[in-house]
């Protein structure tokens, strides 16, 4: 039985040492991404204000 794919919001650190987010659709393609933040908590605050845009996405932090 195939496992259902779900959309995902990934939070990660980029090459400039800034925290960013990206939204991956169920087919694993990146369809949206955000600006860089100095603090990881700032990314979570930004996402909280947009959560209604991605109601079915799970959030994963990549450290």
Image (cartoon, rainbow, N blue to C red):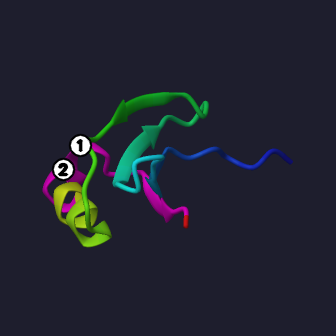
Q: Quadrant of residue 19?
A: bottom left
What residue span does the magenta drawing correspond to?
A: 48-62
Using the image as rendered, state which of residue 41 and residue 59 is in the foreground: 41
Is residue 54 part of the magenta span, yes or no? yes
**In the drawing, does residue 56 fall left or right of residue 49?**
right
**In the drawing, does residue 4 fall left or right of residue 12?**
right
Residue indicated by mark 2: 50
Q: Residue drawn at (40%, 48%), measured in percent from left and top?
A: 16
Residue 36: image tag? none
Q: Residue drawn at (56%, 36%), measured in percent from left and top?
A: 26
Q: Residue drawn at (23%, 54%), measured in percent from left and top?
A: 51
Q: Quadrant of residue 17?
A: bottom left
Single out the residue that lies furthest toward the right: 1
The location of residue 24, given as percent across then percent down, is 49, 38
Is residue 57 part of the magenta span, yes or no? yes
The location of residue 39, given as percent across then percent down, is 26, 68
Number of other residues with Cα within 10 Å of mark 1, as a class: few under 14, some 14 to 19, many 20 or more: few
Residue indicated by mark 1: 53
The location of residue 25, given as percent across then percent down, is 50, 34
- In whole angstroms, how far apart are the C-alphas of marks 2 and 1? 6 Å
The location of residue 21, given as percent across then percent down, is 37, 49
Single out the residue that lies furthest toward the front: 16
Using the image as rendered, state which of residue 12 and residue 58 is in the foreground: 12
**In the drawing, does residue 3 fall left or right of residue 50?**
right
Q: Quadrant of the C terminus?
A: bottom right
Using the image as rendered, state which of residue 36 and residue 23 is in the foreground: 36
| Position above or below: 1 against 32 | below
Q: Residue drawn at (19%, 61%), measured in percent from left and top?
A: 48
Q: Under tag 2, what secondary structure? A: helix
Tell whether label 1 touches label 2 (CB within 8 Å).
yes
Single out the residue that lies furthest toward the left: 49
Using the image as rendered, state which of residue 17 and residue 25 is in the foreground: 17
């Amino acid at each position: 039985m195939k496992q259902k794919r779900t959309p995902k919001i990934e939070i990660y650190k980029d090459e400039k040492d800034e925290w960013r987010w990206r939204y991956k659709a169920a087919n694993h393609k990146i369809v949206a991404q955000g600006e860089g933040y100095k603090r990881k908590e700032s990314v979570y605050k930004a996402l909280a204000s947009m959560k209604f845009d991605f109601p079915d996405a799970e959030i994963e932090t990549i450290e």
